[in-house]
Amino acid sequence: MTYNPAMQKATLAELAPDAHGLISKRSAQLDGVAVTQVTFDVGAKWSVDLKEYAGTDDCLLPHVALVVAGTLGVEMRDGSYEEFSAGDVMLLPPGHDAWAVGETACTFVEFSRGNDYYEGAPA
């Protein structure tokens, strides 16, 4: 027997954004994968805009994403730092802070299968 899945489509621009401070996201759930467009507006920082909502000192979610606009600065708990700009693919482990760098909003599109790409990652 052959498994023949149906094609699926979602248009992120048509989905209502979920905003916290200067950070907003639009999420589409497809069969087995979530696709989320995240925008850090100019001046946005996870530890300012989402920390209270998350209830943690830093972001505990892993991210696999393609940056489509702007630049995202990311600092890990150990102090290591990297910038990801339009065209970069990033894989971020749990335990980081992130912010829009410069005078341009940063947008990335994240792909997730229930965070299963990190063994033992928080849900």
Image (cartoon, grey):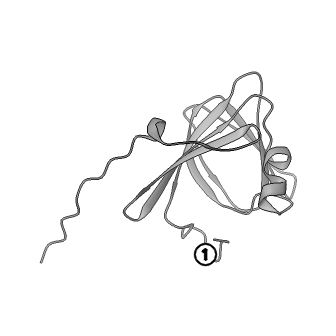
Task: Give 98 or 18, whichever is nearer the viewer.
Answer: 18
Seen in the picture, residue 107 relative to 78 is either above or below; the reply is above
The outermost residue toward the top is 103
* Dot 1 alpha-carbon crowd within 10 angstroms: few under 14, some 14 to 19, many 20 or more: few
What's under tag 1, amino acid-wise?
Glu
Residue 122 as seen in the image, left or right of residue 47: left
Q: Quadrant of the N terminus?
A: bottom left
Q: Quadrant of the C terminus?
A: bottom right
Q: Residue at x 80, y 45 (%)?
A: 49
Question: Residue 25 at what x, y percent from top left?
Answer: 60, 44
Question: Residue 114 at what x, y percent from top left?
Answer: 53, 67
The outermost residue toward the front is 16
Q: Residue at x 82, y 63 (%)?
A: 55
Q: Residue at x 40, y 65 (%)?
A: 32
The mark total stands at 1
Question: Residue 90 at what x, y percent from top left?
Answer: 61, 47
For label 1, the residue is 119
Seen in the picture, residue 50 relative to 32 is either above or below; the reply is above
Q: Residue at x 45, y 38 (%)?
A: 14
Q: Quadrant of residue 62?
A: bottom right
Residue 105 as seen in the image, left or right of residue 30: right
Residue 8 as seen in the image, left or right of residue 47: left
Question: Residue 120 at what x, y percent from top left?
Answer: 65, 77
